[in-house]
Structures are given as structure tokens and as C-alpha cells.
Amino acid sequence: MSAIRKRVLLVGATGTIGTAVAAALSPSHEIVRIARRAADIEMDALSVDSVRAMYEAAGPFDAMVSTMGSAVPGPLAQLSAQDFADSFTRKVLAQINLVLLGIPHIAPAGSFTLSSGILSTMPQPGFAAISMANAAIDGFCRAASLELPAGVRINCVRPVFVRKSFPAGSVADLGGFPAQTAAETAAAYRAVVEGDFTGQDLDPRDLVAPGLAEPECALRLHPDSWPARLGENHMDLEAELRRLADEAEIKRVQLRYCRGLDRMDWDLIRTCFHRDGIHDLGPFKGTVEKFIPWVSALMPSFESTTHFGGGQTVEIDGDDAWAEQYVRAYHRTAATDDSPATDWILNLRYVDHLTRRDGEWRIAHRRCACESQRTDVVTGDAALGPEWLRGERDHTDASYRRRP
């Protein structure tokens, strides 16, 4: 958890949860209370002009926490389309506007925290409009986390029912549906403000916060909850995403080579190798600049070639990678007056050592392992009718045109 004192804009500060969040955050952070009335800054969350004026009045900030937003309860059969529209406007659009209009004012490593609710993942009869609005907020936070400025975080808290929000006995009427005190719920908002994760929706029940009523208390994460492991998992996720991106780029290099051969696109072949990269093909061994004259003289002897890319495996170690690709290569020789058309078929494996230089993966050394080969005689009429789109072995091929 961060020990840095932050300037927090707390929207909905006078409500049940907002009051508890202010109490949880104020010992360690500067709180600017924002509400419709009786607050440091008064704001109508449904008015874009009012939200814009609030940010102008508040000035720069490190975190914006929204505990506001209401939706219409009631059985589905009794809800109107307007009830759903009102629920979306008051809970979803109002909070989205807080993010969109707050981006120009937030600190470079700032955070937005929105409020959804447990009904997004645990729907109950009588709360269809509320469940819809909660789920929309969850989805927005996950998607927005991918596009916010670098370093800016966004998360949402999914409160369960807060005991103080319901008359005595009403929680029991919900069939034992989970409920917490406002102070217990506030622990989740504090965890988000002081954490370093993004794109998450946090269930307050994953937190244990002993002594929250004491100003000097320290927030403690339940050891088995996902936030307690999030620091490690977050780094693991970033590393896994980098690995997947590298693996995808390496596989594209191998597939690009096959396309370059079949289309006789020698510039495309060049993009697969470093300038000093070695191609060991059996009858040929040398750099790519020597390979291209050799293969460009060989390929016209075939009417067409088709390299089918099969299984690919990639192992990455820093800026080095080792990759293998299974390939079946067909080389069609046209029929002559004296002989029928033939297919020379090779079952190959490209065994590659690739390196990343200047941020780009290319082949440093390729070895071509041949598992088997055979030549098949093409029986029957090998000619295609005029109605077929023919493959071309240059830039006139259909694959180079982005429109029909």
C-alpha cells in the first residue's frame, strides 16, 4: 500500500459510503468533499457543465473516488424502458463523465475509482436495472484501463448491501444476501486509492480492515484474497502480455517468410532476416542478400509454390528466441508435351534462432530440416477454368489489394 499523501476528490462524500470513505482516507490523505450540497465543492453529477466546473474549481488531484450513482429497483415486469434509461444515466453515464472530464486534470500517476455493486456478479430478482448499471461500470473500468494515459489507473469497487442503507430487518428479507457496514466497505476504496493495480473490480469482502474506527489503523488485506497477491500477479500479467506479444511477432516472421517465397516477394523475405542473418537451406547456406539471388533464379522453374505453415513453438530468453515451424512445401512443375505436371512435396521444419535488435525480432540463423520428400504426378486436367481467381507471384496478387 502507498504511504504517499494524495489529494483525493471524493464525489458523493455526504452519502453513507462516502462518509465512511472520507473517514478511512482522511488520516493519510487530503480529501476534497464533493456532493450536491453541504460539501467543499457542490456539483450536480448529471450536468456536464457542473462536472466541468467542479474540476476547474478543484484543480490538480491525485485520485478521484466516486461513491455516487443510483438506479431503479423493482421487478422486471414493473420496470419500464425509461427506468432502465434513468438507471444508466444516473449511475453509468454520470460516472463515465467524471472520468472523461477528469483526464485533463489528473496527476500523471493518478487514479479513478468508480462504484458498481455486487449485483453485477450476483444478480437477484427485483434488481434488473441495478444489475445492468453495475455490470456496465465494471466493463467500462476494464476497457478504459487499456486506453487511459500511461500511469493513470482506473478501478471500481463492487459494494455489497450496506447495513445502514436499509431499514431494520430488510437485509434479512433479501434471503441472507451479503451485507457489510459502511466502514468495512470503505476499506476497499482505500485499497484501490493506495494500491498500484488497474482495470479491476474489487469486492470489499476480500479485505480485512481491523480497527477501521481508529484513525491510526493500518489497512490489512486478507492473505487469501486476490488483492493480497495482486502486486506479484500484476507483474506476472505484464510479463505474460509481453511474452505473448513477442511470441506473436516471431510467429509472424516465420509466416511472412512463407508468403514471401510463394509470392516471390524478395523485399518481404528481407524483413524476416537481420542483414547478417544466415540461411542454411541444405543446397544453400549464406546471408539473406546471397540467398535472394539464388532463390529468385530457382523459383521461376516452378509454375507455383505453396508453403503450408503448421505447428509453431517459440521459446524466448530476453532478446534471444528459438522457434520451430513445421512446413509442407508444394512445388508445382507445369506439364510439357513429354511429361505430365508434377508436385514436388517436402515435409520441412524451420529451426530458427531469432534476436531482437532495435525492438524488432528477425532471424539470425535459420536451419531447414527436411523430414521427407516425394514427387507426385498430377493426374487429370490440371488446368483451372477461367472463373477461378488465380494466384499471382508478384504484387498483382489479390492479397496485396485491400479492396476487391
Image: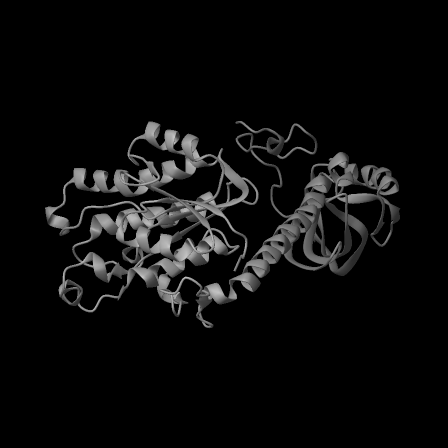
Where residue 70 sits: x, y (%)?
24, 45
Q: Is residue 304 left or right of residue 202?
A: right
Q: Is residue 375 left or right of residue 213?
A: right
Q: Is residue 349 left or right of residue 19?
A: right
Instruction: Place residue 380 in its image quadrant.
Output: top right
Of residues 308 and 30, the one nearer the viewer is 30
Where residue 102 sits: x, y (%)?
44, 36
The answer to whether residue 340 of the structure is visible from this angle is no
Of residues 324 and 177, the one nearer the viewer is 177
Where residue 36 sits: x, y (%)?
27, 38
Asked if 136 appears above or below 186 in the picture, the reply is above
Where residue 371 sits: x, y (%)?
74, 62
Q: Is residue 361 left or right of residue 185?
A: right
Residue farthest to the bottom?
A: 224
Of residues 228 and 7, the one nearer the viewer is 7
Q: Residue at x 39, y 61 (%)?
A: 187
Q: Residue at x 52, y 51 (%)?
A: 5
